[in-house]
């Protein structure tokens, strides 16, 4: 469905680097893009959307997207900051994209926003705005749905609601979805494949089972998430079929392979 073979020079976390990605995504697949900040995840979404220039090729359903304007790419983009029209109501934000009132009503009902259709978006909560943003992204039934950390500003309760809404909409429309995330719990909840970017390239690529729930013969595990707590740094890793949280060195990065010892035995 989606074939990428692109290169672009950009400024990463450690200076100038090349975003060099080869990626194939099947129709209807839900792919999570993970990796440390500055690895090129958001830029990759912007490249697919036509918002960044590149060298190389983007092919969607056999069509080469060379020189195709962003508005002609049949893409839905859910931004971190919602990017809604604040002078419009909830329904008007959706109808601005596509004047199909029946579809707008269906999407709003599916995301529990039907009763707010006539309300101005400035009076909504963060979670409600993000759901409006998701509905608007789907108004044209896009071939590709791109989401850049759609849960980052939400509390746990609202995250759960939005995750359920995304599951329903992804299945309802058979959309091919790419989502940038730093949160392993939301990746587990939604994605069936994970691509880990490191310094502009795909470092790991596989299903949940392949990457996180297998015995590692090299006595190493991959860091899935990093969290700083007071005077220590904790890493989430997968070992022996379980998610574990362990203390690591301060310079440890997401996507890095580290050795661990479990119950006195190295695994």
Image (cartoon, rainbow, N blue to C red):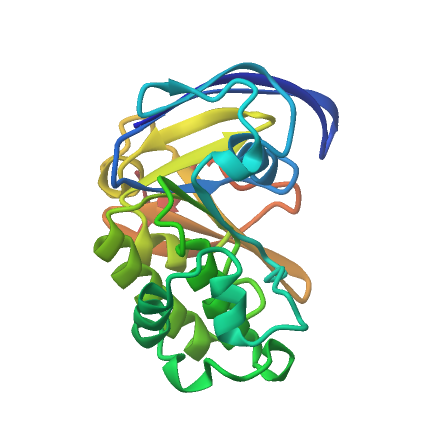
Quadrant showing the C terminus = top left
Q: Is residue 256 visible?
A: no
- Tell me where residue 41 sits by quadrant: top right
- Asked if 165 appears above or below 37 in the picture, the reply is below
- Asked if 105 appears above or below 182 in the picture, the reply is below
Residue under the point 27% across and 44% down? 192
Residue under the point 35% across and 39% down? 143
Front one among 138 and 250? 138
In the image, residue 212 lies at what x, y percent? 30, 42
In the image, residue 31 lies at what x, y percent? 36, 41
Front one among 42 and 202? 42
Residue furthest to the front in view is: 99
Give left or right: position of 53 versus 33.
Answer: right
Front one among 179 and 258? 179
Give left or right: position of 173 versus 75.
Answer: left
- Tell me where residue 204 sits by quadrant: top left
In the image, residue 169 lies at what x, y percent? 29, 59
Residue under the point 34% across and 61% down? 166
Residue furthest to the top in view is: 56
- Say how many tags the image has: 0
In the image, residue 121 lies at what x, y percent? 59, 77
């Amino acid at each position: 469905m989606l074939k990428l073979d692109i290169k672009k020079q950009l400024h990463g976390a450690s200076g100038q680097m090349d975003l060099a990605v080869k990626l194939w995504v099947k129709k209807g697949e839900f792919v999570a893009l993970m990796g440390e900040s500055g690895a090129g995840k958001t830029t990759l979404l912007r490249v697919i959307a036509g918002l960044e220039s590149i060298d190389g090729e983007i092919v969607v359903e056999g069509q080469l997207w060379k020189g195709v304007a962003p508005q002609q790419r049949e893409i839905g983009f859910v931004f971190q900051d919602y990017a809604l029209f604040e002078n419009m109501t909830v329904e008007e934000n959706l109808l601005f994209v596509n004047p199909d009132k029946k579809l707008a009503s269906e999407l709003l009902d599916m995301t529990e926003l039907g009763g707010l259709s006539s309300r101005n978006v400035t009076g909504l909560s963060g979670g409600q705005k993000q759901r409006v943003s998701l509905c608007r992204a789907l108004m044209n039934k896009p071939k590709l749905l791109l989401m850049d950390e759609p849960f980052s500003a939400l509390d746990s309760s609202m995250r759960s609601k939005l995750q359920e809404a995304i599951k329903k909409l992804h299945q309802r429309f058979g959309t091919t979805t790419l989502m940038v995330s730093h949160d392993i719990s939301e990746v587990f909840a939604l994605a069936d494949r994970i691509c880990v970017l490191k310094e502009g390239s795909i470092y790991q690529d596989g299903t949940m089972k392949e990457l996180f729930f297998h015995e590692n013969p090299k006595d190493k595990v991959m860091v899935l998430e990093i969290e700083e707590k007071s005077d220590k740094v904790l890493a989430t890793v997968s070992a022996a079929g379980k998610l574990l949280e362990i203390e690591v060195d301060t310079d440890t990065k997401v996507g890095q392979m580290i050795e661990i010892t479990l119950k006195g035995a190295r695994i």
